[in-house]
Image (cartoon, grey):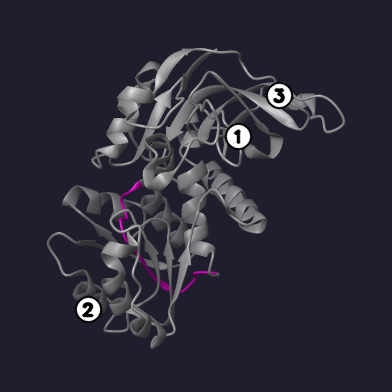
Amino acid sequence: MKAIWYEKTGPAADVLRFGRQDAPVPAAGEVRVRLAASGVNPSDTKRRAGWIGLSMPHPRIIPHSDGAGTIDAVGKGVEGVDEARVGERVWLWNAQSGGRPFGTAAEYAAVPAAQAVPLPDGASFADGAGLGVPGCTAHYAVYGDGPVGGKRILVQGGAGAVGHLAVQLATLGGAEVIATVSSAAKAEVALGGGARHAIDYRREDVADRVLDLTDGAGVHRIIEVDLAANLETDVAVLRENGAIASYSSTSGPELSLAYYPLAFKDLRIHFLQGYLLPSAARRAAVRDLTTWLAAGQLEVRVAATFPLAETASAHEALESGRADGKILVEI
């Protein structure tokens, strides 16, 4: 099969290789998927770059955890998979993680059967390839601290891949959403996803605007894209007993927490890792994402698509910070 791989960490153009290697054979309990699209996430580029001391856990890695395609073979044996799944359109989660070296930047991928989720009729492979990491992360960020009906939620970065899905998921759950964005165009994206208000953090004081929009009461929860950059604002606008669900802190990975401002409001910080959802949270995310996608209530925004041979360019596009939506590789 054609595939992208790396055998050492470093810049995308230096370490990513395009060529052929043997297609995987599904083991008992696995399915093999003929991939149509592969999703690129920040976690994929950070692993490839060796970010914050991330090492090579395998001699060779085919990157990317997200993807979508069609099952073309199933594993045999005691834990065999029903052959009726052959021909089924699916979306994948955690293809390259948890000790698995070979992800979706290839023509084929073999994954445990439960990690190949039926893709609803009418949904595209591009939709499916954008669900795994951003969709499950957004769902856990929104619902990991309980139902959101009737609550006010601030989504920091409401036009990003995770943030835009979080806006939609919180709105579908009955929350009133305020989103922060960096431009008028991104404000339209957040408002289109269901946000009641969009605040341009480059032109407005976020804390002042949130408190003004909530008559001084603040918000119940915050979905956070950069905790180090926004912690002071988050503490200022959270109500007592509020919670921050943080899935990234790129600007300050070594975070210094100010104890008393957090303690005096009895605030909680929930650090998220989209690859490590508890089983119940994963099942809920997979169920809701698939259901809402099937109902046409969920939009996966695609910023750019690259051919497999140009996966290095896809990584560079994501790392540029200019992508407004999901970066995909077309297989």
Badge 2: residue crowd in 10 Å (few <14, some 14–19, many ≥20): few
Question: SS class of the residue under badge 3?
Answer: loop
Task: Label 1: state its secondary structure.
Answer: loop
Residue occupied by mark 2 = 212
Residue drawn at (48%, 58%), measured in percent from left and top?
A: 272
Estimate the x, y position of residue 212 in percent, counting from the top left: 22, 78
Q: Amino acid at mark 3?
A: Pro
- Between label 3 and label 1, give the one nearer the viewer: 1
Q: Is residue 150 magenta?
A: yes
Where residue 100 is drawn, which disc sits there?
1
Q: Is residue 102 above or below residue 20?
A: below
> Horizontally, is 29 left or right of 44 in the view?
right
Q: Is residue 265 above or below residue 58?
A: below
Nearest to viewer (mark 2 / mark 1): 1
Cβ atoms under marks 2 and 1 closer than 8 Å: no
Whether 20 is drawn above or below 95: the answer is: above
Does 185 sit above or below residue 221? above
Q: On residue 26, which mark appears?
A: 3
Residue at 48% in and 67% down: 270
Q: Position of residue 65 (x, y in %)?
A: 51, 36
Q: Nearer the viewer, residue 1 or 46?
A: 46
Q: Which residue range is magenta in the image?
A: 147-160
Q: Earlier in the sequence, mark 2 or mark 3?
A: 3
Whole-percent x, y for residue 78 in the image: 87, 31
Residues 231 and 134: in front is 231
Q: Say whether residue 198 is magenta.
A: no
